[in-house]
Amino acid sequence: MTDRIQDNREDNRMDVLFYGQALSFPLMLGTAQYPSPEILRDAVLAARPGVVTVSLRREAAREKTGQAFWSLIQELGVPVLPNTAGCHTVKEAVTTAHMAREVFGTDWVKLEVIGEQDTLQPDVFGLVEAARILSEEGFKVFPYTTEDLVVAERLLACGCEVLMPWGAPIGSGRGLNNVFGLRALRAHFPGVPLVVDAGLGVPSHAAQALELGYDAVLINTAVARAGDPAQMARAFRLAVEAGQLGRAADPMEERDMAAPSTPVAGKAFLG
Amino acid sequence: MLIMVNDETHDVAATTLAELLEELGYRGARIATALNGHFVPALQRAATPLADGMRVEVVAPMQADKAACERLT
């Protein structure tokens, strides 16, 4: 995975490659739960994300809501990352991935195998199995996982070239629940593109993820359920950019004791 | 013959998956299909026979809400 980073000297940025492709911006935006398709469109236009994630759901012949939704997504012109959202078994996830590949015409898939109803945390055993099956079939798998290092190893061993650890339970808006664990994951896999997926609630959470060295974030509920989704989408974009710039600027080390920011040498004696 | 499509029972004349989609009005739609929990690629629909009681899933890109989660198993 030495090709993770592509030196982009023109604008002094380092572009991370996801299965060989750079994102136009390190923000992935989910398309679920918006109050209306118009509000979704406004949010995407405000966020200008690198990809949008899209689900498959049952289509009724008489309503054809999916066809209208697909037209909207195509108009937006943002690359699509299909997901297996809501799948609870390996079989369900693999079948959904097959259907998504046909409908969306891409072998990228954000793989979710949900293991627990209250936390919606991934079933990591099922996840690894589904990732292995799909990777062998040529899919480029973006696995929604935890920050567990051993699970991460297994996912990489079965062909994943990207990891998407949760920040907090899906839709909880709690931010980065385990900063220590996320930092460890970043340190253990310096060459692997890492995306914080799930649990971010406010823009500062996204900035923090980028500051920790994460390569992108995936947001859905935080934008879709905000009072003003388009404004929140723009706020997340700015936060991602701030976090990315902050990381690139090489932050100072934290210290336990104060250190005067203004040198005391030469200070007048007025006591 | 009775076929379950997305959990709704339909009494249809169709004998293949392709004919079923035509009969139900999915012509031209961007959809994917599964039969009894197994993905059936678009190119194989015409050669996929139906039998009484089979379960068909028809899905499309969708602005899903949290509760929406179909069962494919």
Image (spheres, coloured by chain):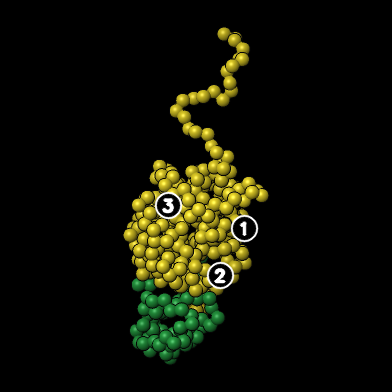
Q: Residue at x 59, y 50 (%)?
A: A7
Q: Which mark is residue A45?
A: 1
Please indicate, yes or no, whether residue A137 appears anywhere in the rendered image: yes
**In this rendering, position of residue B2 left or right of residue A28:** left
> What colour has chain B?
green
Q: Residue at x 57, y 43 (%)?
A: A248
Q: Which mark is residue A75?
A: none
Q: Residue at x 48, y 51 (%)?
A: A191
Q: Which residue is mark 3?
A: A166
Q: Amino acid at mark 3?
A: Trp
Between disc 3 and disc 2, the foreground one is: 3
N-terminal-most mark, 1 or 3: 1
Q: Amino acid at mark 2?
A: Trp
Please indicate, yes or no, whether residue A173 appears anywhere in the rendered image: no
Q: Which residue is mark 2?
A: A70
Do circles 2 and 1 both sit on a common chain? Answer: yes
Is A96 or A263 nearer to us in this picture? A263
Callout 2 touching callout 1 (CB < 8 Å): no
Q: Determine the secondary structure under disc 3.
A: loop
| Above or below, A161 relative to B17 | above
